[in-house]
């Protein structure tokens, strides 16, 4: 084997780093970027606060070459395995300032007393840096979105928001812009390698292909390997449950799976498209999906998590799945020898169970363009508005003709062991007048269709109530006298 | 020197990632410590088998209670809390075995090879069950004034009820951590994340069975404390010290987030029963309340916390006839502990609920009811425990806030909004706080300082307080700069270290700058009078003997001169050099004790507080009546800090404390399963506020021109009180829920008001509306 196949390369701040897993027993292929950084001297700024991507104390910024420009993304380094940053620039809090001059985001944090205990601060600063590189004079909503994934227990956030406003009101002339071309040249050099990385240590095998064809070959050869796109779910098995993942197939480096195209009738979305990119592309095209993505995880999570990965996890409370039912989405599955397209309803088989065969990968999600007379709505009810898992989520589709229900889909998450449609309620409503009275009758049927669970998030009673009420909410949004 | 706007002492280090927290330190040969804890709430330990784990390559030591050389105790006040479980475990999360290993992975692998056999015993897991079994932690306490029974008989109206207030997880960003480094002989050095290094020192000394002078504890900073590291930071320090002692190598422990949430205590949940008697104007005539707290498995600070709850049961209101009964109960949960407010919030929540109910009962505005019951200036100013409330600021704050928040107009606008919206309702509430400042355990109200001037003119300040983000060191920095008359850049605040200042009290009870600021000033006064004599000599002026020397010698803007000859100056640095060459001591200790504090626990009478801090807030919310979700639209806060030591830091404390309170009253819900397993053990399920949860409009102001006589630079403490301003949010939500039934029905309500609580309450009201209508 080519010896280079088991080393990875990336740029740490401004220096090229090569990691050879076989000559460094302290590092495993699944060592997280967080733990890697903290094992180095002078890189202890990055902090572990929760090891599950919920607090953002470990936020770092990744830069990648996107058509000759560097694109900067914040990520939770506690969830990212080292080979996932192969070919990228990793920017840490220690490198933002010049010896005597703070970076604008740092200076404004000082000016506005944005830090108290200081433990969340390095992560906050990196989120502000990401904001600074991507937005000039951002709206409050954009600032809040970029900070949702950074929990601070001291400040109450107000001074951090002020720091963001001030830092991002000046023109970006920081050293990263000045040195951009040098970094791009370094990254290009690494990216010349297109053969797959195969890292094998005593306890783990880690494969990172760069083409779909290679990925499908690995998939066939190692059918039990854990597939990771953004790893935001799978990484928790290591960071929270302390499992050792013996075989990993990392498909995060396959550019072929990162696309969004539309024709006259359908949107085709590559399974490797990350959710933040998807969110930015569908504002007007798929507003219900956009609304859902606005309250989906945090920016750091959406920058990592892929559309395909979210669907593959088949979570019963997944925010996205009910909505895909409403959109009548289809999933394209490919193996080395075959490909097929499966409607979302047939794709989900049970609790975290899908119809993916052990040689297949999800390669594309097809969302048919809704008819102009069809209303698609998404709802997510959670204990906390942002960065929370749904208590109940709903994806609804409604087609009215002369105030009569022609067609309706009512799909729910959080109400059963898998995403489930309220088929009896749908049946009841089809052909009926869309009136408050009818809707209220339907709500009773709906409540009887589900037997939800009580858990850490909610009681069964509350879940049932929400499910019913969401139907009334749908009604209220279709009538002018609604609120 | 202008020091009111000094930036946070560590701000630049924070933003560049250079601030060092315990787990950022690394020492040669350091091992990783891991704590194996009980998986059952109540059980006898039949056997512990770690023979396999011990054989694992990279495991350096495995310890049980049998290996503790000193006392097997962690209890800070009452010794009822084993360091490692002996024959019995009393809660899930109780430490049983300690592992020291070369790295995290090995420690985790070793843990999997340790087999503990239990015989399960009966457990008590809810407060109601503990009450019904009379599982008291200590004898009940009582504070009483007037005659409640008679007053209730003659009161025109009476309302009774119960209120549940939930637990709260501290969620400091830095989980509990410590590194212990063995030294020569019996010495042990501990880098701790502790609000109380002197107590950490005491506990480590006790478990190791050595004298306190063998143990040195240092606290550079904490990544948040909020009370969670007042006593429970000691635990991890003691475990690390035991492992370091056994292996003779440095051992560091930082708890994983989930373990931290499972193992450590929280804000006490309370179940309280109350009756309130009042006239037709809403004036309160009698109040009787029984405050029942869930102490958890051991005493920890539960008695003092219950005491503070009782001492805040009447909040800002003068009530002539009061009976407050306090009971703390034992349950099989981790011992609950200090949390910002220290029982005060739980005590206040009840009276605030009662007043809210009076308003609905009389169909009056709740703010008006509050106003007519405020403590007075010269009369109606004696608390149930007999302390006189002097310089009460409630009336003046009420008038100001009512105007600045535009309360009356908004209340009317809300009524209009609610008339025209079925699925959205808005609510508003104004709530006050009066919070007593001082440790209620009187002897704790003392502090020490050690100030060095080096002969280059720079100053190092050591004091007994700890920095957990609240800005104590920044305030001390400002105080020292003002007192010395030198620029802040010549002054450094050192880490808190038990070898510099001994026998310190916890940095708690909001008292950090009150106590330590005064102690530092005291040390500086000593040094200045020494320097003044040297200066008099050098400047050739005579100091009169009948007045305070350093008033004639002025220290200002890095220079020193006589007030009689202001043009003849010497720089501070030069003066220091002259003093050194004249063999004058340039180091001094300082000390402070709060005067006039006493409280008799038997009679429930005394002067437990040096003064009171006041605050007031108006909040407006909008709820979704189909989902129960809340949107916090606006909060206006007016807070009293006397003459602020540092305005930006004070406002930071107010905003941060308020938002932490908003979390407690809205989304921060703690749940256990029927076996006592914590269900909400990570941020996945335990939801503290994010940036999206702060008010859309957030106005925070300090009450100006109201100096507080007798404290350091006429300031007031600020750490805890603002948390309780969040009652304005909680009761605004209730007001919005109440609007669903046009304020005709009393909503079922508890704390926190999660979306679930809100929606269930709305459904209850909807049924009543239908019942009445149909």
Image (spheres, coloured by chain):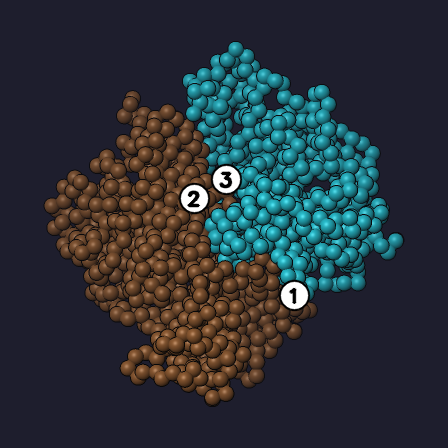
SS label for mark 1? loop
Q: Colour of chain B?
A: brown
Q: Quadrant of the C terminus of chain B?
A: top left
Q: Which mark is residue B698?
A: 2
Residue shown at 61% from the left, 52% from the top: A104
Q: Mark 3, residues whose alpha carbon is within 10 Å: few (<14), some, or many (≥20)?
A: many
Q: Colour of chain A?
A: cyan
Which x, y percent locates residue B642?
A: 34, 58
Q: Chain of mark 3?
A: A
Is residue B298 among what the camera can see?
A: no
Q: Chain of mark 2?
A: B
Contact between labelled residues 3 and 2, with CB atoms less than 8 Å apart? no
Q: Which mark is residue A385?
A: 3
Residue shown at 47% from the left, 43% from the top: B693
Q: Is residue B510 left or right of residue A229?
A: left
Q: Is residue B637 left or right of residue B467?
A: left
């Amino acid at each position: 084997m080519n010896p280079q196949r088991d080393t990875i390369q990336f740029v740490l701040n401004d220096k090229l780093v090569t990691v050879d897993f076989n000559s460094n027993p302290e590092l495993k292929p699944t060592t997280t970027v967080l733990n890697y950084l903290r094992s180095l001297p002078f890189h202890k700024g990055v902090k572990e606060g929760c090891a599950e991507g919920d607090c953002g104390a470990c936020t770092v910024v990744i830069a990648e070459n996107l058509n000759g420009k560097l694109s900067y993304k914040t990520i939770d380094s506690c969830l990212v395995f080292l080979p996932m940053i192969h070919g990228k620039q990793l920017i840490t809090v220690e490198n933002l300032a010049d010896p005597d001059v703070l970076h604008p985001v740092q200076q404004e944090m000082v000016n506005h007393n944005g830090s108290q205990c200081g433990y969340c601060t390095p992560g906050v600063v990196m989120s502000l840096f990401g904001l600074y590189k991507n937005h000039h004079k951002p709206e409050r909503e954009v600032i809040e979105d970029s900070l949702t994934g950074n929990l601070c227990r001291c400040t109450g956030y107000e001074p951090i928001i002020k720091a963001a406003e001030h830092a991002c009101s000046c023109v970006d002339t920081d050293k990263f812009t000045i040195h951009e071309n040098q970094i791009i040249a370094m990254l290009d050099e690494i990216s010349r390698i297109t053969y797959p990385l195969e890292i094998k240590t005593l306890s783990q095998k880690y494969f990172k292909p760069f083409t779909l064809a290679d990925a499908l070959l690995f998939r066939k050869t190692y059918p039990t390997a854990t597939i990771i796109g953004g790893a935001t779910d799978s990484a928790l098995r290591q960071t929270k449950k302390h499992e050792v993942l013996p075989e990993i197939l990392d498909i995060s480096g396959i550019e072929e799976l990162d696309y969004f195209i539309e024709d006259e009738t359908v949107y085709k979305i590559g399974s490797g498209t990350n959710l933040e990119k998807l969110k930015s592309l569908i504002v007007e095209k798929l507003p219900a999906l956009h609304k859902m993505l606005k309250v989906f995880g945090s920016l750091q999570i959406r920058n990592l998590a892929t559309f395909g990965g979210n669907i593959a996890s088949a979570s019963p409370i997944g925010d996205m799945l009910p909505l895909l039912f409403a959109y009548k989405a289809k999933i394209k599955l490919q193996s080395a020898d075959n490909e097929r397209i499966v409607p979302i309803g047939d794709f989900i088989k049970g609790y975290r169970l899908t119809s993916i065969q052990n040689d297949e990968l999800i390669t594309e999600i097809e969302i048919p363009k809704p008819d102009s007379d069809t209303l698609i709505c998404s709802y997510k009810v959670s204990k906390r508005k942002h960065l929370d898992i749904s208590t109940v989520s709903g994806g609804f589709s409604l087609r009215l003709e002369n105030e009569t229900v022609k067609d309706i889909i009512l799909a729910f998450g959080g109400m059963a062991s898998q995403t489930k449609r309220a088929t009896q309620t749908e049946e009841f409503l089809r052909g009926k007048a869309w009136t408050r009275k009818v809707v209220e009758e339907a709500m009773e049927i709906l409540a009887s269709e589900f037997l939800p669970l009580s858990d850490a998030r909610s009681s069964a009673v509350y879940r049932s109530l929400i499910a019913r009420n969401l139907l009334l909410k749908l009604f209220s949004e279709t009538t002018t006298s609604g609120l | 020197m202008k020091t009111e706007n000094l930036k946070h002492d560590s701000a630049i280090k924070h933003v560049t990632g250079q601030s060092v927290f315990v787990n950022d330190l690394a020492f040669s040969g350091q091992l990783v410590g891991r704590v194996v804890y009980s998986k059952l709430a109540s059980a006898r330990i039949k056997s512990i088998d770690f023979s396999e784990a011990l054989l694992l390559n990279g495991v350096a030591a495995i310890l049980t209670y049998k290996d503790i050389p000193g006392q097997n105790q962690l209890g800070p006040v009452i010794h009822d809390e084993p360091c490692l479980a002996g024959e019995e475990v009393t809660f899930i999360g109780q430490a049983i075995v300690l592992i020291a290993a070369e790295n995290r992975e090995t420690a985790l692998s070793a843990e999997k090879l340790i087999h503990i056999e239990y015989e399960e015993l009966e457990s008590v897991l809810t407060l109601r069950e503990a009450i019904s079994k009379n599982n008291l932690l200590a004898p009940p306490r009582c504070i009483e004034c007037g005659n409640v029974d008679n007053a209730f008989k003659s009161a025109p109206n009476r309302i009774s009820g119960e209120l549940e207030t939930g637990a709260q997880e501290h969620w400091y960003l830095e989980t509990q951590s410590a590194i212990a480094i063995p030294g020569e002989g019996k010495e042990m050095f501990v880098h701790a994340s502790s609000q109380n290094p002197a107590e950490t020192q005491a506990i480590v000394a006790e478990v190791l069975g050595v004298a306190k002078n063998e143990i040195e504890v240092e606290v550079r900073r904490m990544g948040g404390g909020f009370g969670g590291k007042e006593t429970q930071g000691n635990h991890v320090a003691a475990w690390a010290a035991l492992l370091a002692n056994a292996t003779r190598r440095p051992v560091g422990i930082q708890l994983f987030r989930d373990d931290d949430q499972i193992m450590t205590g929280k804000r006490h949940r309370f179940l309280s029963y109350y009756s309130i008697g009042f006239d037709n104007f809403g004036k309160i005539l009698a109040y009787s309340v029984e405050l029942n707290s869930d102490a958890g498995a051991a005493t920890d600070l539960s008695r003092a916390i219950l005491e503070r709850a009782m001492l805040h049961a009447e909040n800002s209101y003068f009530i002539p006839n009061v009976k407050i009964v306090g009971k703390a109960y034992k349950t099989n949960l981790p011992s609950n502990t200090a949390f910002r407010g220290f029982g005060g919030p739980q005590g206040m929540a009840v009276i605030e609920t009662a007043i809210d109910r009076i308003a609905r009962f009389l169909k009056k505005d709740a703010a008006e009811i509050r106003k007519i019951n405020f403590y007075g200036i010269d009369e109606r100013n004696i608390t149930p425990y007999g302390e006189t409330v002097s310089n009460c600021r409630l009336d003046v704050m009420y008038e100001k806030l009512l105007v600045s928040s535009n309360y009356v107009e908004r209340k009317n606008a809300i009524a209009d909004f609610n008339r025209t919206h079925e699925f959205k309702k808005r609510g508003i509430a104004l709530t006050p706080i009066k919070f007593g400042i001082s440790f209620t355990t009187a002897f704790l109200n003392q502090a020490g300082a050690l100030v060095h001037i080096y002969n280059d003119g720079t100053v190092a300040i050591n004091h007994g307080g700890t920095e957990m983000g609240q800005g104590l060191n920044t305030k001390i920095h400002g105080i020292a700069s003002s007192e010395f008359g030198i620029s802040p850049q010549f002054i450094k605040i050192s880490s808190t270290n038990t070898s510099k200042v001994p026998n310190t009290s916890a940095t708690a009870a909001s008292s950090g700058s009150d106590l330590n600021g005064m102690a530092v000033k005291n040390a500086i006064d000593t040094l200045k009078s020494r320097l003044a004599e040297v200066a008099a000599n050098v400047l050739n002026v005579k100091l009169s003997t009948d007045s305070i020397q350093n008033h004639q010698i002025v220290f200002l803007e890095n220079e020193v001169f006589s007030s009689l000859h202001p043009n003849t100056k010497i720089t501070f640095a030069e003066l220091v050099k002259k003093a050194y060459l004249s063999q004058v001591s340039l180091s001094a200790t300082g000390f402070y004790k709060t005067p006039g504090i006493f409280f008799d626990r038997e009679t429930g009478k005394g002067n437990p507080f040096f003064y009171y801090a006041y605050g007031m807030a108006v909040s407006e919310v909008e709820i979704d009546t189909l989902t129960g979700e809340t949107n916090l639209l606006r909060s206006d806060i007016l807070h009293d800090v006397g003459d602020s030591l540092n305005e930006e830091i004070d406002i930071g404390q107010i905003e941060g404390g308020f938002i932490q309170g908003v979390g407690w009253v809205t989304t921060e819900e703690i749940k256990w399963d029927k076996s006592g397993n914590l269900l909400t053990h990570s941020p996945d399920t335990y939801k503290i506020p994010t940036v999206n949860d702060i008010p859309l409009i957030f106005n925070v102001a300090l009450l100006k021109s109201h100096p507080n006589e007798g404290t350091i630079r006429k300031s007031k403490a600020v750490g805890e009180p603002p948390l309780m301003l969040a009652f304005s949010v909680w009761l605004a939500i209730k007001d919005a829920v109440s609007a669903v039934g046009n304020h005709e029905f009393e909503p079922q309500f508890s704390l926190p008001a999660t979306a679930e609580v809100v929606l269930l309450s709305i459904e209850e009201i909807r049924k009543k509306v239908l019942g009445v209508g149909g």
